[in-house]
Amino acid sequence: MFAVIGTGPVQILQKLGFAHSGLRLPFASLPEDGIARNNAISAFLMGALPPAAGSAISVLLFTFFVWALVSMAFGRFAFRMTRSDRLLAWTCTLFVGLIVLTALVGENSSQAPRSFVWLLTFLAPWAIIPRLRASEGVDYLSPYITGAAVGAIAACLIAFVQLAIFDVRPASGAGNEAVFGMMSLCLMGLGGLKIGSDTRAGILLGLVAIGAGLAAILMSLTRGVALSAIPVLLLLAVFAPLKLRAVILRPATIPAFIAAFVILYFIQDALDARFQETVGELGILLHNGNTDGPIGERVRLWHAALEAIRQSPILGYGIQNRMDALVPTLMLDGNAIRGFTHAHNSVLTFMLDGGVLVLSAMIGVLCMPVVLAWRAPRDASYRMRLFAALIVCGSYALCGMTQIMFKHDIMDSFFVFFSILIAASIPDDERQAR
């Protein structure tokens, strides 16, 4: 579907003089092979679009998934996966299978199938990895991380317009403020890996991505995500400390600092109001035990979830009964029961879905990119692959303590495609191929 993108836009931009700087255009060095070219463009788009276009990445992922199945069926490329690829695919499949199983043995099993559609995303590795393997030798991490840097900058611009000009909490194409913040966090970390580039323009792009992504996170006013940004920034500092220090001291960074001060000036009232709101909610919760407000409501949900889990720790209640299991405890305080779809803590949420079985599978899915990156051969992309996995998986784990992790189309599609790229970026050792 992306064949029309080809080299046309590149040639046009080159004629207009945009290809003469040290910063490579996203499509300036596309492979000539059709599958490889489309794969590279897909990687860039999946990195750039999450905050701005939101569910567009879900549409793209399912398009890649279906088209890969069709292509394999017609023999355009062979089904080929390494042992590492299969480990990722089977881990995701086990996650899907255990959620389905625990749902079918739970109450209201006839209502379970409507809760299974989102799980199709986790089966995508079986088709998309062979497509990526069909163009062996193509570096997919570079266009993906470049796309992430572009996405972080776009997220900052959109958030600034929404918050500073229209005075609304930024959500952009994500449609949800917290999801927008979490996508901005991931793209800040991934785009920030450009600071390890060998070119000055690439390093500068990485620095701008870090600043823009951090600004987008702050403007999302999502407190759990803002706290999660701290360890991500520390990972980036560990990734390329010397280059980061060198670029910060360059005169070219002065406009970036000016832009940061301008953003802070226009959004300071919103940030101050959010801070005062947080202090007030914590004060009421700690002194009076009142669960009014977002923080108190989370504590209330966590308490009810723990009570429900104690009664069914092994199999949970089935994904279709996740929130119904909390009702008996939530009714005890006499407060209103709001229509939440998850317990605002992913550990508790998946324990409700399928007990320790589903929780173990979820942890496996979450950790698998790090495991694959750690065990990969120490090629030229080893450090970038490992730090990318640490950043994304760590961001999901940290944000998942107070927000949603999976069972949201944007969050699912982003993580699954990222995991696929991590696996497919590992060189194919023919001794592992099956």
Image (spheres, helix red, strand yellow):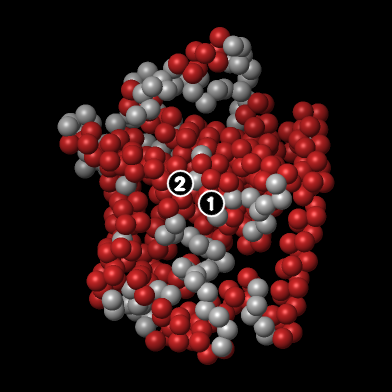
Q: Nearer the viewer, residue 246 or 309?
A: 309
Q: Nearer the viewer, residue 182 or 82?
A: 182
Residue 55 image label = 2
Mark 2 crowd level (few <14, some 14–19, many ≥20, 10 Å Cα): many
Examine the rendering and report whether any part of residue 176 can be seen. Answer: yes
The image quadrant that residue 287 belongs to is bottom right
- Where's residue 372, x and y in %? 40, 49
Secondary structure of residue under mark 1? loop
* Quadrant of the image containing the N terminus: top left
In the picture provided, is 41 more to the left or to the right than 166?
left
Secondary structure of residue under mark 2? loop
- Where's residue 424, x and y in %? 37, 39
Amino acid under label 2? Ser
What residue is pinned by disc 1? 175
The image quadrant that residue 206 belongs to is top right
- Name which residue lies at 76% across and 56% down: 271
- Where's residue 160, x and y in %? 70, 43
Q: Nearer the viewer, residue 241 or 368?
A: 368
In the picture provided, is 373 more to the left or to the right than 315?
right
Examine the rendering and report whether any part of residue 214 can be seen. Answer: no
* Quadrant of the image containing the C terminus: top left
Circle count = 2
Q: Nearer the viewer, residue 54 or 417?
A: 54
- Name which residue lies at 38% across and 31% down: 39
- Where's residue 259, x and y in %? 77, 37
Real-space CA distance between mark 2 and mark 1, rounded to the nearest whole angstrom: 9 Å
- Name which residue lies at 30% across and 63% down: 114
Residue 9 vertical position relative to residue 289 in the rendered view, above or below? above
- Name which residue lies at 68% across and 31% down: 204
Mark 1 crowd level (few <14, some 14–19, many ≥20, 10 Å Cα): some
Amino acid under label 1? Gly
* Mark 2 touches mark 1? (CB < 8 Å): yes
